[in-house]
Amino acid sequence: MMRSIAIRLAVTFGIVALLVFSLSGYALYQTLAQTLAKQQEDDLRSKLEMAERLVGDVHTVERWDELRNTLTTITTTDGNTRFWIACDNTALTYGYPFPDRNHPRLGSDIKSLVMEGSPDPMKTLGRTLRPLPDFPEIHLVVGVSTGPATHTLRAFMIALIAITFCGIVFVAGFGYMVARFGLRPLARLSAGAQTLSPKNLCQRLHLSPPVSELMPLTASFNGALDRLETAYSQLQGFSADVAHELRTPIGNIIGMNQVALTRERTPEELKETLQSNLEELERLRAIVNDMLFLARADQGETASALIKASLAGEVAKTIDFLEPLMEEKALSVDTLGDAEVSVDRALFRRAMSNLLHNAIQYSPAGAQLRVELRRHADSVEVAVSNPGAAIPPEHLGRLFDRFYRADPARALSADNHGLGLAIVKAIATMHGGTVFAISHAGVNTIGLTLQARG
Ligand SMILES: Nc1ncnc2c1ncn2[C@@H]1O[C@H](COP(=O)(O)OP(=O)(O)O)[C@@H](O)[C@H]1O
Ligand SMILES: [Mg+2]
Protein backbone atom coordinates (compact mmCIF):
# COMPACT_ATOMS: atom_id res chain seq x y z
CA MET A 1 0.00 0.00 0.00
CA MET A 2 1.34 3.39 -0.89
CA ARG A 3 1.67 5.78 1.99
CA SER A 4 1.65 9.54 1.89
CA ILE A 5 3.86 11.36 4.36
CA ALA A 6 1.68 14.46 4.08
CA ILE A 7 -1.49 12.52 4.90
CA ARG A 8 0.18 10.72 7.76
CA LEU A 9 1.42 14.01 9.20
CA ALA A 10 -2.04 15.56 8.74
CA VAL A 11 -3.68 12.63 10.56
CA THR A 12 -1.13 12.90 13.36
CA PHE A 13 -1.76 16.64 13.67
CA GLY A 14 -5.50 15.89 13.73
CA ILE A 15 -5.08 13.37 16.55
CA VAL A 16 -2.96 15.81 18.55
CA ALA A 17 -5.56 18.54 17.99
CA LEU A 18 -8.30 16.14 19.14
CA LEU A 19 -6.38 15.41 22.34
CA VAL A 20 -5.60 19.07 23.06
CA PHE A 21 -9.12 20.27 22.31
CA SER A 22 -10.85 17.53 24.28
CA LEU A 23 -8.58 17.88 27.32
CA SER A 24 -8.92 21.66 27.46
CA GLY A 25 -12.64 21.36 26.66
CA TYR A 26 -13.09 18.92 29.53
CA ALA A 27 -11.24 21.23 31.93
CA LEU A 28 -13.33 24.24 30.82
CA TYR A 29 -16.53 22.25 31.13
CA GLN A 30 -15.69 21.14 34.66
CA THR A 31 -14.80 24.69 35.71
CA LEU A 32 -18.05 26.04 34.31
CA ALA A 33 -20.09 23.25 35.96
CA GLN A 34 -18.49 23.97 39.33
CA THR A 35 -18.98 27.72 39.01
CA LEU A 36 -22.64 27.24 38.11
CA ALA A 37 -23.19 24.85 41.02
CA LYS A 38 -21.56 27.32 43.40
CA GLN A 39 -23.72 30.16 42.05
CA GLN A 40 -26.84 28.05 42.54
CA GLU A 41 -25.97 27.32 46.15
CA ASP A 42 -25.30 30.99 46.85
CA ASP A 43 -28.62 31.80 45.23
CA LEU A 44 -30.37 29.17 47.34
CA ARG A 45 -28.86 30.46 50.56
CA SER A 46 -29.72 34.10 49.86
CA LYS A 47 -33.27 33.16 48.92
CA LEU A 48 -33.67 31.14 52.10
CA GLU A 49 -32.38 34.09 54.14
CA MET A 50 -34.86 36.38 52.42
CA ALA A 51 -37.73 33.96 53.07
CA GLU A 52 -36.62 33.66 56.67
CA ARG A 53 -36.77 37.43 57.04
CA LEU A 54 -40.26 37.47 55.55
CA VAL A 55 -41.41 34.78 57.96
CA GLY A 56 -39.79 36.71 60.80
CA ASP A 57 -41.85 39.77 59.89
CA VAL A 58 -45.07 37.87 60.55
CA HIS A 59 -46.26 38.85 63.97
CA THR A 60 -49.84 37.64 63.96
CA VAL A 61 -51.70 34.70 62.55
CA GLU A 62 -53.75 37.12 60.46
CA ARG A 63 -50.65 38.17 58.54
CA TRP A 64 -49.92 34.59 57.48
CA ASP A 65 -52.02 35.06 54.32
CA GLU A 66 -50.02 38.17 53.57
CA LEU A 67 -46.86 36.07 53.78
CA ARG A 68 -48.35 33.52 51.41
CA ASN A 69 -49.09 36.29 48.89
CA THR A 70 -45.60 37.72 49.13
CA LEU A 71 -44.07 34.27 48.61
CA THR A 72 -46.33 33.70 45.61
CA THR A 73 -45.28 37.03 44.11
CA ILE A 74 -41.61 36.28 44.41
CA THR A 75 -42.04 32.72 43.13
CA THR A 76 -41.05 33.13 39.57
CA THR A 77 -43.71 32.29 37.09
CA ASP A 78 -41.54 29.72 35.27
CA GLY A 79 -41.24 27.79 38.51
CA ASN A 80 -37.49 28.06 38.78
CA THR A 81 -37.73 29.16 42.39
CA ARG A 82 -40.17 27.66 44.84
CA PHE A 83 -41.05 28.01 48.53
CA TRP A 84 -42.68 25.52 50.83
CA ILE A 85 -43.85 25.75 54.39
CA ALA A 86 -44.57 22.43 56.07
CA CYS A 87 -46.28 22.35 59.41
CA ASP A 88 -48.33 20.01 61.59
CA ASN A 89 -50.98 22.65 61.49
CA THR A 90 -52.20 22.38 57.91
CA ALA A 91 -53.54 25.94 58.10
CA LEU A 92 -49.99 27.19 58.03
CA THR A 93 -48.68 25.09 55.15
CA TYR A 94 -47.77 26.60 51.80
CA GLY A 95 -46.55 25.46 48.44
CA TYR A 96 -47.54 22.99 45.81
CA PRO A 97 -46.75 20.13 45.25
CA PHE A 98 -46.82 19.82 48.94
CA PRO A 99 -43.59 18.24 50.18
CA ASP A 100 -43.75 15.72 52.91
CA ARG A 101 -42.53 17.27 56.11
CA ASN A 102 -40.48 14.21 56.81
CA HIS A 103 -39.17 14.06 53.33
CA PRO A 104 -35.57 12.98 53.78
CA ARG A 105 -34.41 15.44 51.13
CA LEU A 106 -35.72 18.45 52.98
CA GLY A 107 -33.11 19.17 55.56
CA SER A 108 -30.65 21.80 56.53
CA ASP A 109 -28.25 20.51 53.80
CA ILE A 110 -28.62 21.19 50.13
CA LYS A 111 -30.56 18.30 48.58
CA SER A 112 -31.77 17.38 45.20
CA LEU A 113 -35.47 17.02 44.71
CA VAL A 114 -37.03 15.50 41.64
CA MET A 115 -40.17 17.36 40.76
CA GLU A 116 -43.09 15.68 39.21
CA GLY A 117 -43.69 16.92 35.65
CA SER A 118 -40.33 18.66 35.41
CA PRO A 119 -37.25 17.08 33.77
CA ASP A 120 -34.75 19.01 35.87
CA PRO A 121 -34.41 18.31 39.58
CA MET A 122 -34.45 21.15 42.07
CA LYS A 123 -31.87 21.97 44.67
CA THR A 124 -33.49 22.54 48.00
CA LEU A 125 -32.44 23.99 51.33
CA GLY A 126 -34.61 24.04 54.41
CA ARG A 127 -34.71 25.39 57.95
CA THR A 128 -36.95 24.72 60.93
CA LEU A 129 -38.31 27.84 62.65
CA ARG A 130 -40.75 28.91 65.24
CA PRO A 131 -41.97 32.33 64.07
CA LEU A 132 -44.08 33.15 67.13
CA PRO A 133 -43.95 31.76 70.60
CA ASP A 134 -47.45 30.32 70.35
CA PHE A 135 -46.85 28.95 66.83
CA PRO A 136 -45.99 25.37 66.11
CA GLU A 137 -42.62 24.64 64.48
CA ILE A 138 -42.63 25.28 60.76
CA HIS A 139 -40.26 23.96 58.08
CA LEU A 140 -39.35 26.58 55.58
CA VAL A 141 -37.89 25.13 52.34
CA VAL A 142 -36.54 26.95 49.26
CA GLY A 143 -36.00 25.17 45.92
CA VAL A 144 -34.09 26.41 42.91
CA SER A 145 -34.36 24.60 39.63
CA THR A 146 -31.15 23.23 38.10
CA GLY A 147 -32.71 23.67 34.65
CA PRO A 148 -31.02 26.95 33.58
CA ALA A 149 -27.59 25.70 34.65
CA THR A 150 -28.15 22.40 32.84
CA HIS A 151 -29.16 24.27 29.70
CA THR A 152 -26.12 26.53 29.88
CA LEU A 153 -23.85 23.50 30.32
CA ARG A 154 -25.48 21.69 27.42
CA ALA A 155 -25.10 24.70 25.12
CA PHE A 156 -21.50 25.03 26.22
CA MET A 157 -20.86 21.33 25.50
CA ILE A 158 -22.36 21.61 22.00
CA ALA A 159 -20.22 24.67 21.32
CA LEU A 160 -17.14 22.79 22.57
CA ILE A 161 -17.83 19.80 20.32
CA ALA A 162 -18.33 22.09 17.33
CA ILE A 163 -15.13 24.02 18.09
CA THR A 164 -13.19 20.76 18.58
CA PHE A 165 -14.45 19.39 15.28
CA CYS A 166 -13.67 22.58 13.37
CA GLY A 167 -10.30 22.81 15.12
CA ILE A 168 -9.38 19.26 14.12
CA VAL A 169 -10.39 19.84 10.53
CA PHE A 170 -8.46 23.11 10.45
CA VAL A 171 -5.31 21.72 12.11
CA ALA A 172 -5.29 18.59 9.94
CA GLY A 173 -5.89 20.61 6.77
CA PHE A 174 -3.29 23.17 7.71
CA GLY A 175 -0.89 20.36 8.70
CA TYR A 176 -1.44 18.74 5.33
CA MET A 177 -0.62 21.97 3.53
CA VAL A 178 2.45 22.57 5.67
CA ALA A 179 3.64 19.01 5.09
CA ARG A 180 3.13 19.38 1.34
CA PHE A 181 5.05 22.63 1.47
CA GLY A 182 7.82 21.02 3.56
CA LEU A 183 8.08 18.10 1.14
CA ARG A 184 8.52 20.31 -1.89
CA PRO A 185 12.33 19.99 -1.85
CA LEU A 186 11.84 16.21 -2.14
CA ALA A 187 9.74 16.69 -5.24
CA ARG A 188 12.49 18.91 -6.65
CA LEU A 189 15.06 16.22 -5.84
CA SER A 190 12.97 13.60 -7.55
CA ALA A 191 12.58 15.84 -10.61
CA GLY A 192 16.36 16.22 -10.63
CA ALA A 193 16.84 12.46 -10.32
CA GLN A 194 14.51 11.86 -13.25
CA THR A 195 16.82 13.70 -15.61
CA LEU A 196 19.71 11.36 -14.79
CA SER A 197 20.72 9.02 -17.57
CA PRO A 198 23.90 7.34 -18.80
CA LYS A 199 24.34 10.31 -21.16
CA ASN A 200 24.82 12.77 -18.32
CA LEU A 201 26.39 10.64 -15.62
CA CYS A 202 28.43 13.60 -14.40
CA GLN A 203 25.24 15.29 -13.24
CA ARG A 204 24.67 15.42 -9.48
CA LEU A 205 21.66 16.19 -7.33
CA HIS A 206 21.72 19.47 -5.49
CA LEU A 207 19.13 21.60 -3.78
CA SER A 208 19.38 25.35 -3.73
CA PRO A 209 18.86 26.62 -1.16
CA PRO A 210 20.21 23.55 0.63
CA VAL A 211 17.82 21.70 2.95
CA SER A 212 19.66 20.39 6.00
CA GLU A 213 17.43 17.33 6.48
CA LEU A 214 17.98 16.25 2.90
CA MET A 215 21.74 16.83 2.85
CA PRO A 216 22.61 13.25 3.97
CA LEU A 217 20.24 11.86 1.33
CA THR A 218 21.68 13.97 -1.50
CA ALA A 219 25.21 13.25 -0.29
CA SER A 220 24.73 9.48 -0.26
CA PHE A 221 22.82 9.56 -3.53
CA ASN A 222 25.62 11.58 -5.14
CA GLY A 223 28.14 9.16 -3.65
CA ALA A 224 26.28 6.32 -5.33
CA LEU A 225 26.32 8.31 -8.58
CA ASP A 226 30.10 8.81 -8.23
CA ARG A 227 30.60 5.07 -7.88
CA LEU A 228 28.24 4.37 -10.75
CA GLU A 229 30.02 6.86 -12.95
CA THR A 230 33.38 5.30 -12.19
CA ALA A 231 32.05 1.79 -12.75
CA TYR A 232 30.31 2.89 -15.93
CA SER A 233 33.37 4.58 -17.39
CA GLN A 234 35.49 1.58 -16.40
CA LEU A 235 33.02 -0.63 -18.17
CA GLN A 236 33.11 1.58 -21.24
CA GLY A 237 36.89 1.58 -21.12
CA PHE A 238 36.84 -2.15 -20.68
CA SER A 239 34.76 -2.68 -23.80
CA ALA A 240 37.14 -0.45 -25.75
CA ASP A 241 40.10 -2.42 -24.33
CA VAL A 242 38.46 -5.74 -25.22
CA ALA A 243 37.93 -4.61 -28.79
CA HIS A 244 41.49 -3.38 -28.92
CA GLU A 245 42.92 -6.63 -27.51
CA LEU A 246 40.93 -8.79 -29.88
CA ARG A 247 41.80 -6.70 -32.87
CA THR A 248 45.48 -7.62 -32.87
CA PRO A 249 45.13 -11.43 -33.02
CA ILE A 250 42.24 -11.17 -35.46
CA GLY A 251 44.26 -8.80 -37.63
CA ASN A 252 47.18 -11.23 -37.49
CA ILE A 253 45.01 -14.18 -38.56
CA ILE A 254 43.48 -12.21 -41.45
CA GLY A 255 46.90 -10.92 -42.53
CA MET A 256 48.48 -14.38 -42.51
CA ASN A 257 45.60 -15.86 -44.46
CA GLN A 258 45.69 -13.06 -47.00
CA VAL A 259 49.43 -13.54 -47.49
CA ALA A 260 48.96 -17.30 -47.81
CA LEU A 261 46.32 -16.81 -50.45
CA THR A 262 48.34 -14.40 -52.65
CA ARG A 263 49.86 -17.29 -54.60
CA GLU A 264 50.10 -21.07 -54.78
CA ARG A 265 51.53 -22.55 -51.52
CA THR A 266 53.15 -25.82 -50.81
CA PRO A 267 51.46 -28.00 -48.22
CA GLU A 268 54.34 -27.20 -45.82
CA GLU A 269 53.81 -23.48 -46.20
CA LEU A 270 50.04 -23.88 -45.62
CA LYS A 271 50.71 -26.01 -42.58
CA GLU A 272 52.90 -23.27 -41.20
CA THR A 273 50.16 -20.70 -41.77
CA LEU A 274 47.63 -22.95 -40.05
CA GLN A 275 50.06 -23.37 -37.17
CA SER A 276 50.38 -19.59 -36.74
CA ASN A 277 46.61 -19.21 -37.05
CA LEU A 278 46.17 -21.77 -34.33
CA GLU A 279 48.50 -19.86 -32.01
CA GLU A 280 46.61 -16.64 -32.55
CA LEU A 281 43.31 -18.43 -32.07
CA GLU A 282 44.58 -19.92 -28.83
CA ARG A 283 45.57 -16.49 -27.67
CA LEU A 284 42.08 -15.29 -28.51
CA ARG A 285 40.58 -18.20 -26.64
CA ALA A 286 42.72 -17.42 -23.59
CA ILE A 287 41.57 -13.78 -23.60
CA VAL A 288 37.93 -14.77 -24.04
CA ASN A 289 38.15 -17.40 -21.29
CA ASP A 290 39.75 -14.93 -18.90
CA MET A 291 37.10 -12.36 -19.72
CA LEU A 292 34.34 -14.88 -19.12
CA PHE A 293 35.89 -15.75 -15.79
CA LEU A 294 36.05 -12.08 -14.80
CA ALA A 295 32.48 -11.53 -15.95
CA ARG A 296 31.27 -14.37 -13.74
CA ALA A 297 33.25 -13.01 -10.82
CA ASP A 298 31.71 -9.58 -11.45
CA GLN A 299 28.28 -11.11 -11.25
CA GLY A 300 29.10 -12.02 -7.67
CA GLU A 301 30.12 -15.63 -8.10
CA THR A 302 32.00 -16.74 -4.99
CA ALA A 303 34.31 -19.67 -4.38
CA SER A 304 32.03 -22.61 -3.72
CA ALA A 305 34.21 -25.74 -3.87
CA LEU A 306 35.87 -24.94 -0.56
CA ILE A 307 38.14 -27.67 0.73
CA LYS A 308 40.51 -27.46 3.67
CA ALA A 309 43.97 -27.62 2.18
CA SER A 310 47.59 -26.91 2.98
CA LEU A 311 48.43 -23.84 0.94
CA ALA A 312 52.13 -24.75 0.84
CA GLY A 313 51.12 -28.04 -0.79
CA GLU A 314 49.09 -26.23 -3.43
CA VAL A 315 51.96 -23.80 -4.07
CA ALA A 316 54.37 -26.75 -4.51
CA LYS A 317 52.08 -28.35 -7.10
CA THR A 318 51.85 -25.09 -9.02
CA ILE A 319 55.63 -24.71 -8.95
CA ASP A 320 56.04 -28.27 -10.31
CA PHE A 321 53.88 -27.28 -13.20
CA LEU A 322 55.99 -24.18 -13.93
CA GLU A 323 59.35 -25.99 -13.48
CA PRO A 324 60.20 -26.01 -17.22
CA LEU A 325 59.73 -22.21 -17.44
CA MET A 326 61.88 -21.66 -14.38
CA GLU A 327 64.61 -23.91 -15.69
CA GLU A 328 64.75 -21.87 -18.87
CA LYS A 329 65.72 -18.82 -16.82
CA ALA A 330 67.66 -20.79 -14.16
CA LEU A 331 65.35 -19.51 -11.44
CA SER A 332 64.85 -21.11 -8.04
CA VAL A 333 62.01 -20.63 -5.58
CA ASP A 334 61.65 -20.85 -1.79
CA THR A 335 58.35 -21.45 -0.09
CA LEU A 336 58.17 -20.17 3.49
CA GLY A 337 55.43 -20.91 5.98
CA ASP A 338 52.18 -22.76 5.55
CA ALA A 339 48.54 -22.36 6.44
CA GLU A 340 45.60 -24.74 6.45
CA VAL A 341 42.48 -23.00 5.18
CA SER A 342 39.39 -23.78 3.19
CA VAL A 343 39.95 -22.69 -0.39
CA ASP A 344 38.74 -23.51 -3.84
CA ARG A 345 41.90 -25.33 -4.84
CA ALA A 346 41.54 -24.87 -8.59
CA LEU A 347 41.05 -21.12 -8.15
CA PHE A 348 43.92 -20.84 -5.69
CA ARG A 349 46.27 -22.62 -8.07
CA ARG A 350 45.15 -20.38 -10.89
CA ALA A 351 45.99 -17.31 -8.82
CA MET A 352 49.36 -18.79 -7.81
CA SER A 353 50.11 -19.68 -11.39
CA ASN A 354 49.39 -16.09 -12.51
CA LEU A 355 51.56 -14.62 -9.75
CA LEU A 356 54.44 -17.06 -10.37
CA HIS A 357 54.20 -16.56 -14.12
CA ASN A 358 54.70 -12.84 -13.58
CA ALA A 359 57.55 -13.44 -11.14
CA ILE A 360 59.26 -15.69 -13.68
CA GLN A 361 58.64 -13.26 -16.50
CA TYR A 362 59.63 -10.04 -14.73
CA SER A 363 62.77 -11.26 -12.91
CA PRO A 364 66.29 -11.46 -14.30
CA ALA A 365 67.77 -14.85 -15.14
CA GLY A 366 69.19 -16.81 -12.21
CA ALA A 367 67.07 -14.94 -9.66
CA GLN A 368 65.74 -16.33 -6.45
CA LEU A 369 61.94 -16.19 -6.11
CA ARG A 370 60.09 -16.53 -2.87
CA VAL A 371 56.57 -17.50 -1.87
CA GLU A 372 55.59 -16.55 1.68
CA LEU A 373 52.49 -17.83 3.45
CA ARG A 374 51.55 -15.94 6.58
CA ARG A 375 48.67 -16.68 8.86
CA HIS A 376 46.85 -13.75 10.55
CA ALA A 377 43.93 -13.74 12.96
CA ASP A 378 41.24 -14.01 10.33
CA SER A 379 43.11 -14.09 7.06
CA VAL A 380 46.00 -15.73 5.28
CA GLU A 381 48.50 -13.69 3.28
CA VAL A 382 50.16 -15.17 0.21
CA ALA A 383 53.04 -13.08 -1.19
CA VAL A 384 55.19 -13.82 -4.24
CA SER A 385 58.45 -11.85 -4.42
CA ASN A 386 61.05 -11.57 -7.11
CA PRO A 387 64.00 -9.27 -7.71
CA GLY A 388 63.37 -6.91 -10.58
CA ALA A 389 63.18 -3.35 -11.75
CA ALA A 390 61.23 -1.16 -9.34
CA ILE A 391 57.59 -0.63 -10.29
CA PRO A 392 56.85 3.13 -10.17
CA PRO A 393 54.30 3.99 -7.47
CA GLU A 394 51.81 5.36 -10.01
CA HIS A 395 51.62 1.89 -11.55
CA LEU A 396 51.46 -0.09 -8.31
CA GLY A 397 47.82 0.66 -7.58
CA ARG A 398 46.71 -0.10 -11.12
CA LEU A 399 48.47 -3.41 -11.76
CA PHE A 400 45.26 -5.25 -10.91
CA ASP A 401 43.18 -3.30 -13.44
CA ARG A 402 42.07 -5.20 -16.50
CA PHE A 403 44.41 -4.98 -19.47
CA TYR A 404 46.78 -2.82 -17.46
CA ARG A 405 50.47 -3.30 -18.15
CA ALA A 406 53.12 -1.22 -16.46
CA ASP A 407 55.25 -1.52 -19.57
CA PRO A 408 53.17 -0.91 -22.70
CA ALA A 409 55.80 -2.60 -24.84
CA ARG A 410 54.73 -5.86 -23.25
CA ALA A 411 51.32 -5.50 -24.83
CA LEU A 412 52.72 -6.84 -28.00
CA SER A 413 53.93 -10.05 -26.44
CA ALA A 414 51.68 -12.99 -27.01
CA ASP A 415 51.44 -14.12 -23.39
CA ASN A 416 50.75 -10.78 -21.84
CA HIS A 417 47.19 -9.77 -22.28
CA GLY A 418 47.13 -7.95 -18.97
CA LEU A 419 44.35 -9.95 -17.32
CA GLY A 420 46.55 -12.12 -15.03
CA LEU A 421 46.47 -9.86 -11.97
CA ALA A 422 42.84 -8.88 -12.57
CA ILE A 423 42.05 -12.59 -12.22
CA VAL A 424 44.17 -12.83 -9.06
CA LYS A 425 42.13 -9.97 -7.65
CA ALA A 426 38.85 -11.62 -8.62
CA ILE A 427 39.95 -14.87 -6.97
CA ALA A 428 40.97 -12.99 -3.79
CA THR A 429 37.56 -11.29 -3.74
CA MET A 430 35.83 -14.62 -4.23
CA HIS A 431 37.59 -15.80 -1.06
CA GLY A 432 36.70 -12.67 0.89
CA GLY A 433 40.21 -11.27 0.57
CA THR A 434 42.15 -8.52 -1.21
CA VAL A 435 45.36 -8.00 -3.18
CA PHE A 436 48.49 -5.95 -2.61
CA ALA A 437 51.63 -4.93 -4.53
CA ILE A 438 54.84 -3.61 -2.98
CA SER A 439 58.01 -2.59 -4.77
CA HIS A 440 60.87 -2.09 -2.35
CA ALA A 441 64.66 -2.31 -2.52
CA GLY A 442 64.76 -4.05 -5.85
CA VAL A 443 62.24 -6.67 -4.82
CA ASN A 444 58.69 -6.70 -6.15
CA THR A 445 56.16 -8.42 -3.94
CA ILE A 446 52.68 -9.07 -5.25
CA GLY A 447 50.12 -11.15 -3.48
CA LEU A 448 46.66 -11.74 -2.13
CA THR A 449 44.93 -12.42 1.12
CA LEU A 450 42.25 -15.02 1.73
CA GLN A 451 39.67 -15.02 4.46
CA ALA A 452 40.71 -17.77 6.86
CA ARG A 453 37.77 -20.16 7.01
CA GLY A 454 38.24 -23.27 9.09
N1 LIG B 1 56.41 -9.72 -10.52
C1 LIG B 1 56.29 -8.58 -11.21
N2 LIG B 1 57.34 -7.73 -11.33
C2 LIG B 1 57.21 -6.58 -12.02
N3 LIG B 1 56.07 -6.16 -12.63
C3 LIG B 1 55.00 -6.97 -12.55
C4 LIG B 1 55.06 -8.21 -11.85
N4 LIG B 1 53.86 -8.78 -11.91
C5 LIG B 1 53.08 -7.94 -12.67
N5 LIG B 1 53.75 -6.87 -13.04
C6 LIG B 1 53.25 -5.73 -13.84
O1 LIG B 1 51.84 -5.78 -13.78
C7 LIG B 1 51.29 -5.81 -15.09
C8 LIG B 1 50.02 -6.60 -15.09
O2 LIG B 1 50.26 -7.96 -14.86
P1 LIG B 1 49.32 -9.05 -15.42
O3 LIG B 1 47.95 -8.65 -15.07
O4 LIG B 1 49.76 -10.38 -15.00
O5 LIG B 1 49.46 -8.83 -16.97
P2 LIG B 1 50.53 -9.38 -17.94
O6 LIG B 1 51.49 -10.24 -17.15
O7 LIG B 1 49.75 -10.13 -18.90
O8 LIG B 1 51.18 -8.15 -18.50
C9 LIG B 1 52.35 -6.40 -15.93
O9 LIG B 1 52.22 -5.95 -17.23
C10 LIG B 1 53.60 -5.85 -15.30
O10 LIG B 1 53.88 -4.57 -15.78
MG1 LIG C 1 50.86 -11.88 -16.12
Image: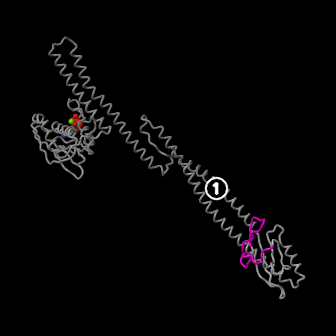
Q: Is residue 302 left or right of residue 45?
A: left
Left or right, 321 with reference to 163:
left
Residue 268 versus residue 178 in the image, above or below: above
For ligand 2, which image quadrant applies? top left
Q: Residue furthest top?
A: 264
Say whether residue 288 is left or right of residue 62: left
Q: Main secondary structure of the magenta part?
A: loop
Q: How many marks?
A: 1
Tag 1's secondary structure?
Answer: helix
Q: Please say whether residue 114 is visible from this viewpoint.
A: yes
Task: Residue at 26%, 23% (x, y): give it.
Answer: 250
Q: Please state which amino acid type lies under the numbered disc 1.
A: Gly
Measured as percent of width and height from the top left, residue 258 is found at 24, 16
Magenta stretch: give its range: 98-123
Graded by Cα atoms within 10 Å as few (under 14), some (14 to 19) or many (20 or more), the crowding at tag 1 reads some
Residue 103 falls in image quadrant: bottom right
In percent of width and height, residue 92 lies at 85, 80
Residue nearest the observer in this picture, 170 or 410: 170
Which residue is tagged 1? 167
Which scheme is used to colour this image of the protein? one colour
Q: Is residue 406 visible?
A: no
Image coords of residue 173 (percent x, y): 61, 50
